[in-house]
C-alpha cells in the first residue's frame, strides 16, 4: 500500500524560493477544437506533457497562463518521486470539467487527476488535483481481482479488528464505542452483503466512520502493507528528497511595501538537524520584511514539531506555549513551545503577520493557523479550513486491511479546545483566490497607519 508523502504540497508547488522570471505564456487554448476534444482535457494533457518531460519552465508557464495567482502545479521532487505519469484514459465530466486516470512511471500506483475550468473563461483553471488511489477495476488483472475478493466471514473479521483498534487507540473512547457499534449495525442489517471487492469495502467503511464522527483523518485502507513501522531511509537519502521538495516550502517573494509572501505547503519531519537548518534558511529570507504573509492555502499538514519550529520565527526568543498533544492510549500529554534558539534570523514578534487559508488547508496547516490566531500573533484570512486536529498513525488489521487511526488530539492552552470538525474560522472571511490580495491590502494599511 503506497501513500504519497506531502503529495498535496508537491502539487501545490514546492518550487525553489528564488523562481526565475516567468517565460512567455503558452498560446491561449480555445474552448473546443476541430477534433471535439474539450479544453479541459487539452489543458490536462498539456500539463502532463510538460511535467513528464521534466520541463519545469513549461510547467511554470502553464501556471502563469492558466492558474494566475496560484503556485506552480508540480515540482522536481514530485517528478522524481513518481517518475511522471502514463495517462490511461481521460473523460469529460461536464463542459468545464474532466478527469484522467493515470499511473506512476516508477510503480504500479494509480491516481485520479481532475481539472475544473472557469465557465466564463475556459483558459482559467479553478482547480487541478492529482490524488493517489487504488487501481481502477477496468485495469485489474485476473490475479488482482482474485486478491481483492471478499466473503462474509472476511467482512465480519475486518469489522471486529477495526472495533478492537478503535477501543484500544482512538482518541475519544465514547466515539470509539459509537463507531464500532455503527459498523456492526451496518453488518447486521446486511448493508455490506453485496460488497465483494476489498477496495470498495475499505471505501464504504471509511464513509461510514466519517458519517459517525466527521473525523476526516480516519481512513480504512486495502492492500499489502508493512505490519510494523519500517526503519527510515538513510539520512542522506531523506535529506536529498526533502531538498528536492524544498523542505515543504513554495515560492518566497517580496511584494509591494516590503511585504514578504511565504508559501508553505507542508511540514516535513525536522528531527534531522539539516532539515531545521534548511527551514531556518528559508524563513530567514523574510526576516527583514516589514510585514509577513504565510500562505497555507495548499498546506495538507505534516509534523507538529515542525509546525512549532516554523511558528518560532514569528515570535521573539522567549518561548511561547502554543499547543499540547494528548495521547489517550499512553495517557500522556506533550506540550509544544516555540524555540528559544533558532538557525538563521527571526521575523520576530512585533511586526504584522497574516495567514492565508482555504478549505484545503488541513491538519498541521490548520495547527499553525490556529496557534497564531489564538495567541493573537496573526490575522487569519481566507476560508474555513478542513477541520482535522487529530494526529494519526497506521494500524494494521490483517494482511490486507489497515486503518489510519487518530490516536491523539491537539489542545490549545488558551481555548482548551481545537479545530476538530469545525476548522479554523478566519478572522477575515474571503475566497481563497482573493485572500492574498486582501492580506496585502491590510498589510499596507497597517504599515502606513
Image: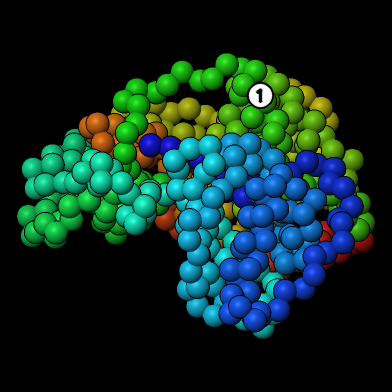
Residue 357 lies, in percent from the top left, at 63, 57
User: Would you say 188 lies left or right of 64 here?
Assistant: left
Instruction: Give the quarter of the figure containing the N terminus.
Output: top left
Q: Which residue does the image show at 22% across and 32% down from the upper left?
A: 398
User: Would you say 42 lies left or right of 147 here?
Assistant: right
Q: Is residue 294 visible?
A: no
How many numbered callouts?
A: 1
Q: Which residue does the image show at 65% across and 31% down from the upper left?
A: 242
Q: Which residue does the image show at 60% across and 71% down from the upper left?
A: 40
Outermost residue to the front: 35
**Above/below status of 178 relative to 384:** above
User: Would you say 60 lies left or right of 116 here?
Assistant: right
**Helix, strand or loop under label 1:** helix
Task: Tell me if mark 1 has few (under 14), some (14-19) or many (20+) residues whose alpha carbon lies within 10 angstroms of its own.
Answer: some
**Above/below status of 307 relative to 231:** below
Q: Which residue does the image show at 92% across and 56% down from the upper left?
A: 257
Instruction: Give the quarter of the figure containing the C terminus.
Output: bottom right
Residue 50 lies, in percent from the top left, at 70, 53
Residue carrying label 1: 239
Looking at the picture, the colour scheme in use is rainbow
Residue 169 lies, in percent from the top left, at 29, 33
Residue 214 lies, in percent from the top left, at 35, 56
In-front residue for pair 33/239: 33
In-front residue for pair 206/417: 206
Within the image, what quadrant is residue 6 found in?
top right
Q: Is residue 81 visible?
A: yes
Amino acid at each position: 500500500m503506497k501513500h504519497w508523502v506531502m503529495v498535496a504540497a508537491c502539487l501545490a508547488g514546492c518550487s525553489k524560493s528564488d523562481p526565475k522570471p516567468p517565460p512567455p505564456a503558452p498560446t491561449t487554448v480555445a474552448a473546443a477544437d476541430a477534433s471535439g476534444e474539450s479544453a479541459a482535457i487539452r489543458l490536462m494533457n498539456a500539463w502532463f506533457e510538460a511535467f513528464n518531460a521534466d520541463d519545469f519552465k513549461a510547467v511554470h508557464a502553464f501556471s502563469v497562463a492558466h492558474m494566475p495567482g496560484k503556485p506552480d502545479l508540480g515540482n522536481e521532487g514530485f517528478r522524481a518521486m513518481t517518475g511522471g505519469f502514463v495517462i490511461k484514459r481521460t473523460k469529460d465530466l461536464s463542459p468545464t470539467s474532466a478527469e484522467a486516470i493515470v499511473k506512476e512511471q516508477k510503480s504500479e500506483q494509480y491516481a485520479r487527476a481532475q481539472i475544473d475550468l472557469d465557465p466564463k473563461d475556459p483558459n482559467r483553471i479553478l482547480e487541478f488535483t492529482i490524488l493517489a488511489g487504488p487501481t481502477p477495476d477496468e485495469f485489474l488483472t485476473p490475479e488482482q481481482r482474485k486478491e481483492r475478493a471478499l466473503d462474509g466471514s472476511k467482512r465480519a473479521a475486518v469489522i471486529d479488528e477495526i472495533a478492537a483498534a478503535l477501543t484500544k487507540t482512538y482518541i475519544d473512547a465514547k466515539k470509539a464505542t459509537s463507531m464500532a457499534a455503527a459498523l456492526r449495525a451496518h453488518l447486521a442489517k446486511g448493508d455490506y452483503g453485496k460488497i465483494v471487492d476489498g477496495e470498495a469495502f475499505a471505501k464504504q467503511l471509511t464513509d461510514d466512520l466519517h458519517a459517525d464522527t466527521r473525523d476526516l483523518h480516519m481512513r480504512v485502507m486495502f492492500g499489502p502493507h508493512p505490519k510494523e513501522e519500517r526503519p527510515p531511509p538513510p539520512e542522506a537519502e531523506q535529506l536529498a528528497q526533502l531538498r528536492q521538495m524544498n523542505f515543504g516550502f513554495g515560492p518566497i517573494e517580496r511584494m509591494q511595501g516590503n511585504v514578504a509572501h511565504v508559501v508553505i505547503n507542508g511540514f516535513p519531519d525536522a528531527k534531522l538537524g539539516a532539515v531545521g537548518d534548511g527551514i531556518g534558511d528559508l524563513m530567514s529570507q523574510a526576516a527583514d520584511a516589514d510585514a509577513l504573509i504565510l500562505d497555507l492555502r495548499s498546506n495538507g499538514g505534516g509534523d507538529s514539531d515542525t509546525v512549532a519550529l516554523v511558528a518560532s520565527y514569528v515570535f521573539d526568543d522567549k518561548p511561547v506555549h502554543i499547543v499540547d498533544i494528548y495521547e489517550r492510549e499512553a495517557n500522556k500529554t506533550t506540550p509544544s513551545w516555540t524555540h528559544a534558539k533558532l538557525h538563521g534570523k527571526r521575523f520576530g514578534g512585533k511586526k504584522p503577520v497574516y495567514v492565508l487559508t482555504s478549505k484545503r488547508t488541513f491538519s498541521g496547516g490548520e495547527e499553525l493557523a490556529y496557534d497564531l490566531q489564538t495567541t493573537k500573533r496573526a490575522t487569519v484570512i481566507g476560508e474555513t479550513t478542513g477541520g482535522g486536529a487529530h494526529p494519526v498513525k497506521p494500524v494494521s488489521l490483517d494482511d490486507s486491511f489497515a486503518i489510519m487511526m487518530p490516536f491523539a488530539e491537539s489542545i490549545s492552552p488558551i481555548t482548551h479546545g481545537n479545530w476538530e470538525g469545525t476548522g479554523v474560522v478566519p478572522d477575515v472571511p474571503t475566497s481563497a483566490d482573493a485572500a492574498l490580495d486582501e492580506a496585502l491590502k491590510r498589510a499596507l494599511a497597517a504599515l502606513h497607519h
